[in-house]
Image (tube, helix red, strand yellow):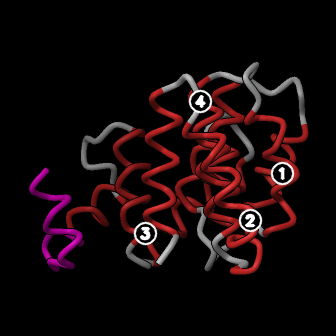
Amino acid sequence: TILDCLTRASDPEALSQLRTRITSGSGSSFESQMNAAGKLAQLGDDSGREFLRGLVARRDEHQLVAARLLASSADPSTVGIFRQILADSRATAAAQQLAAEGIGLSGEVADLALLVPYMSAGSAPNLRVAAARSTLQLSARDPAFLSQNTLAWVQVAVGDPSEIVRQTAVDTLAENVT
């Protein structure tokens, strides 16, 4: 949307509109408020981060989505939520996918072990893609690991029957290898 473009350009009026959306609701749906807070948080805006932190602290049905929107390597405060979900075999595939995405943004190289089970052929395709993308994101934080293991992973992913997995391998490799 135009508001998204203006926000990315740090347009003061656009940022103000997003802040208003999360503070007053301004007739917006809760989902719209969360999205506005996520955009502000990505831009480093404290009001967006605080809104999302409040949702994470409530520990209700919005916690995981808020944690995912808040996740970044600069703010690893939500990584424990993602680790807990990835370690829980009873979690839904949707929750596992959000957790895999979040751990890729906020986790550590040691978290790779949590992602490995979700890259198997028995996992849902979207979950496999999220786990693969997060694996490369985490691997990129350790140049030695990336150089030793990325090519092996890409070789396997390129041969995957899923076009989504193959394309993700290429896209993610291009983003993370310079």
- Label 4: few (<14), some (14–19) or many (≥20) C-alpha neighbours in 10 Å: some
Residue 122 in view in this figure: yes
Residue 63 in view in this figure: no
Question: How far apart are labels 4 and 1 at the CA level?
Answer: 26 Å
Q: Which mark is residue 107?
A: 2
Q: Disc 1 designates what residue?
A: 83
Residue 92 in which image quadrant: top right
Q: Residue at x 43, y 41 (%)?
A: 167
Frontmost residue, 75 versus 26? 75
For the residues carrying marks 3 and 4, which lies nearer the camera in this image? 4
Q: Disc 3 designates what residue?
A: 42
Task: Tell me which amino acid carries mark 4.
Answer: Asp
Q: Position of residue 98 (x, y in %)?
A: 62, 41
> Is the Cβ of the residue at disc 2 closer than 8 Å to that at disc 1?
yes
Q: Which mark is residue 66?
A: none
Question: How far apart are labels 2 and 1 at the CA level?
Answer: 9 Å
